[in-house]
Amino acid sequence: MPTPPTATADTSPEPAERPAPTAAASGRDLRLDLFRGLALWFIFLNHVPNNVGNWITNRNFGFSDATEIFVFISGYTAAMVYGRQLDSSGVLVTSARILRRAWQLYVAFIFLFVIYLAEISYVVGSFENPLYAEEMGALQFLAEPDVALVQALLLKFRPANMDVLPLYIVLLATFPPILWALKRWADGALVASFLLWLAVQFLGFNLPGYPDDRTWFFNPFAWQLMFVFGGWCGLGGSDRLTGLVQSRVVLVLSVLYLALSLAVVTSWYWPPMEGLVPPAIGDIIYPISKTDLSVLRFAHFLALAVVIVRLIPVQAAFLRWDVLKPLIMCGQHSLEVFCFGVFLSFAAHFVLNEVSGSLFMQLTMSVSGIALMVGLSALLSWYARAERDRMARKKAG
């Protein structure tokens, strides 16, 4: 697991959303920004159907995908930043800051919802193709916009590709008591989180969605385990796992599990390997639920984390290579980049359907979308630096 950054890392109340002035000098763990940026790129590519670009994403090479990376790192950075504030500012002030951040995410979701539905509605009306509304989960909005809008305000109605943000809102809004528990009794909090996840696996409860026959695609009662585990690691748990992570036996088992996962996933797409999983085994492991964070998905993430930590130490020199700066910048502005990626994914889907679905166009849409996401993150980084310089001059003058 990532080694916690030193105490001089960014102490912004908005975890990992605003980059530290000098990440390398501050002790900031660049792996967090790097892999959250990579997760955002993968999420964008995965949201563009019939696109060769999404074949490079990690969902095609194992049981877990970019969502596990994003939620784990979000929990890690939230605990790391707000944990220090809890020590210096107390429970009430820190809780208020967490809830303020959750409110900001909620406002961002509503803004994204309105603009995204406007984008879909415009395409449906202009091209007289109602299939877009059905495919993007917007039929209810077009049929009864008043009801759908109220349900969106309650986070129950979410068009396609918008499920991650409501999950993050709920996890952050409920984080104050969890953070307090992680600071006071870390192992007990993690065990309680695990027991809640385990109850979901057997009882299958979830939050209601809209229409009434639906539930949340990302079950918060299950996915809280990934978030809390990230928080546990961010508050020092990763140090306690060092011996386990550095074990050669654990590394070998992790690599074997990753290879087995790759073989199983390959059997879903490649006809010569269709019979790889015997029916008796398939009855046990399937479905590998993303909604309820299947144990196979969680185990795959853990195995992947072990391998990555062994391959990429926190002080790896290549983390500061210029070629990786676009990924790191995207990870440092994850909220804005995610929202922008949702718009871009539908625009790319539209172009591939209405203009050309050729291999060249698929690659063009994939590269162009990522380039625009990087451009936005660069603009935000520039603005953040300009604001810091302005404040510095104001204090000096």
Image (tube, rainbow, N blue to C red):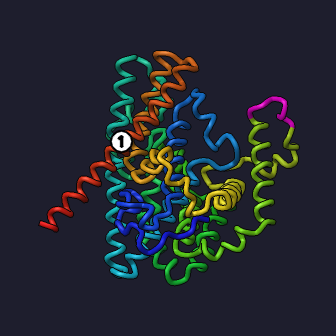
User: Is residue 274 rendered magenta in the image?
Assistant: yes
Residue 311 x %, y %: 66, 57
The answer to whether 13 appears left or right of 52 in the picture is left
Q: Which residues are magenta?
A: 269-275
Q: Position of residue 261 (x, y in %)?
A: 76, 48
Mark 1 residue type: Leu
> What count of labels does the image hold?
1
Label 1, on which residue?
376
Question: Residue 54 at what x, y percent from top left?
Answer: 59, 34
Quarter of the rendering containing residue 230 = bottom right
- Residue pushed farthest bottom? 184
Question: Is 46 displayed left or right of 350 in the figure?
Answer: right
- Quarter containing the C terminus: bottom left
| Point 23% across, 58% down: residue | 389
In screen coordinates, is 320 left or right of 116?
A: right
Identified at 46% across, 70% down, the residue is 80
Q: Position of residue 293 (x, y in %)?
A: 63, 55
222 magenta-colored: no
Q: Which residue is nearer to you in this view: 387 or 276?
A: 387
Q: Does residue 298 appear in this view?
A: no
* Residue at 88% from the left image edge and 47% from the top image edge: 280
Q: Is residue 109 above or below residue 229?
A: above
Q: Residues within 10 Å of mark 1 (few under 14, many from 20)?
A: some
**From this viewpoint, which residue is outermost toward the left?**
397
Q: Is residue 145 above or below residue 306?
A: above
Secondary structure under the numbered disc 1 in the rendered image: helix
Res. 239 in view: yes
Q: Nearer the viewer, residue 155 or 92?
A: 92
In the rendered image, which quarter is residue 347 located in?
top left
Q: Horizontal placement of 4 versus 18: left or right?
A: right
Quadrant of the rendering where the N terminus is positioned:
bottom right
Please say if 40 is above or below 247.
Answer: above
